[in-house]
Image: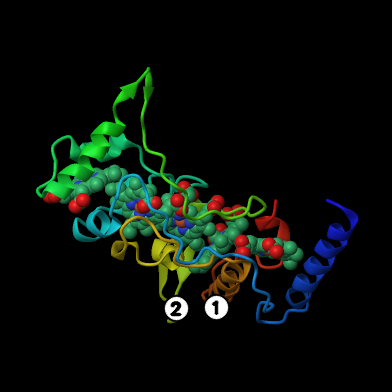
Amino acid sequence: MNAKLAVLFLVLTVAMAMPILLGIRSVPDIQLPNLHTGYQPEQEIPYSHRLHAGVLNIDCQYCHTGADQGRHATIPTLDTCMNCHQTVKGRTTSAQENIQKLYDARLVEDGVPVGVEWKRVHNNPDFVYFNHQTHVRIAKYIDAEGKISDGVDCAYCHGDMTKTGVAKQEEQLTMGFCINCHRDQNDRHVAANLPARAPVNACDACHR
Ligand code: HEC
Ligand code: HEC
Ligand code: HEC
Ligand code: HEC
Ligand code: HEC
């Protein structure tokens, strides 16, 4: 980093930290450059969340098995799809054509499986640390009425995925989005006599 940039970064950092350090309740109104809301890249296979998670009501974690186990929710391999598509070949011609793409992706060419390259939708900058397990399994989420549930619902951060086809980014997932929730949750945890563990001022919890 050159010297000018380093100074700019320091100023930005201090400017952003001040209201937090001073205990002001609202996050500074700086919009970080995150242009991804609404991002929905086309995928090689038109996999539909609406059909699978909505109409067929398959649990999110049947496919995203990492969500309660570690940092990444993970994208399922074709083996998971084959649990059904070994036998489910599609009723309409277009469904059959789309499911055929799954079979084609399982072929091996020159010793290498063809596979599917799913395009990434959500992508926090590398300097941000986010862990699914903490949020999906360990956190207690307390709503405005004081009702306590185990884990934060996927929809809080990803919107209602049962209404989209291939995945789409619904929330901006900015620093303000994270911290506002942390602050509210800590207040509600204190009110409910539970430990308040969501980092607000500890920059290095999210930037390690
Ligand atoms: C629990 C069972 C199940 C699993 C697991 C499953 N599917 Fe499906 N899928 C279905 C059913 C049922 C249909 C509807 C087929 C029909 O009747 O036309 C379908 C339809 C489809 C279609 C065709 C939709 C259309 O109308 O064009 C595609 C493509 C597809 N699935 C992809 C996938 C992929 C990719 C995975 C893995 C990530 C997957 N499916 C996992 C049950 C499943
Ligand atoms: C508190 C917010 C939050 C909750 C709750 C949440 N996610 Fe995420 N999710 C994120 C963020 C932030 C990213 C981007 C992570 C990155 O780029 O490193 C992400 C990325 C993903 C990804 C793609 C990358 C990966 O980590 O594998 C999938 C798939 C995913 N989430 C599925 C889920 C599912 C399924 C649930 C519920 C069981 C869920 N998420 C709950 C915030 C959340
Ligand atoms: C049958 C398997 C299956 C089920 C069930 C399923 N997903 Fe997915 N999900 C996928 C596949 C395959 C992708 C990659 C293609 C795409 O981006 O749509 C994906 C992508 C995603 C992504 C974007 C990942 C990224 O690159 O950032 C999120 C977020 C996500 N799913 C959340 C959910 C949530 C929430 C549910 C439950 C409401 C759910 N999924 C149910 C298979 C599934
Ligand atoms: C729906 C509210 C909510 C949102 C949104 C949310 N968090 Fe959290 N987060 C929590 C709660 C509650 C905890 C405390 C979990 C516990 O009890 O240990 C927590 C804990 C954490 C921790 C400390 C534990 C660990 O995993 O190391 C980090 C870091 C963190 N969150 C990062 C993030 C980031 C980054 C985002 C935004 C992309 C985010 N959070 C969005 C509620 C939320
Ligand atoms: C709860 C998690 C969390 C905490 C705590 C946190 N940040 Fe962040 N921060 C983020 C996320 C998420 C982003 C990325 C936002 C985006 O992509 O738009 C970010 C981005 C930034 C950026 C980059 C701005 C840019 O232009 O991209 C700076 C600088 C920063 N944070 C400084 C801080 C400082 C200083 C603190 C402590 C006072 C802090 N952060 C605490 C989650 C957090």
Of all residues shown, which one is farthest toward the left? 91
Give the alpha-carbon distance from disc 1 to disc 2, as whole Å. 9 Å
In the rendered view, tell whether residue 91 sits above or below residue 184: above
Q: Residue at x 47, y 64 (%)?
A: 140
Locate residue 187 relative to residue 90 in the image: left or right: right
In the rendered view, tell whether residue 159 sits above or below residue 47: below
Residue 85 in which image quadrant: top left
In the rendered view, tell whether residue 160 sits above or below residue 92: below
**Please, what is the three-letter code of the amino acid marked with disc 1?**
Ala
Of all residues shown, which one is farthest toward the right? 3
Few, some or many residues within 10 Å of mark 1 (<14, 14–19, 20+): few
Mark 1 lies within 8 Å of ligand 4 (Cβ measured): no
x then y, percent, for residue 97: 19, 43
Mark 2 lies within 8 Å of ligand 4 (Cβ measured): no
From where the camera sits, is residue 41 visible? yes
Q: Identify the residue under disc 2.
A: 146
Q: Identify the residue under disc 1.
A: 191
Residue 98 in which image quadrant: top left
From where the camera sits, is residue 61 visible? no
Residue 146 in which image quadrant: bottom left
Locate residue 169 relative to residue 51 in the image: left or right: right
x then y, percent, for residue 20: 73, 74
**Please, what is the three-letter code of the amino acid marked with disc 2?**
Gly
Few, some or many residues within 10 Å of mark 2 (<14, 14–19, 20+): few
For the residues bearing labels 1 and 2, Cβ distance under 8 angstroms: yes
x then y, percent, for residue 41: 42, 55
Q: Quick one: SS at disc 2?
A: loop
Q: Quick one: SS at disc 1?
A: helix
Mark before the other along the chain sequence, 1 or 2: 2
In the rendered view, tell whether residue 52 sits above or below residue 187: above
Q: Residue at x 65, y 81 (%)?
A: 26
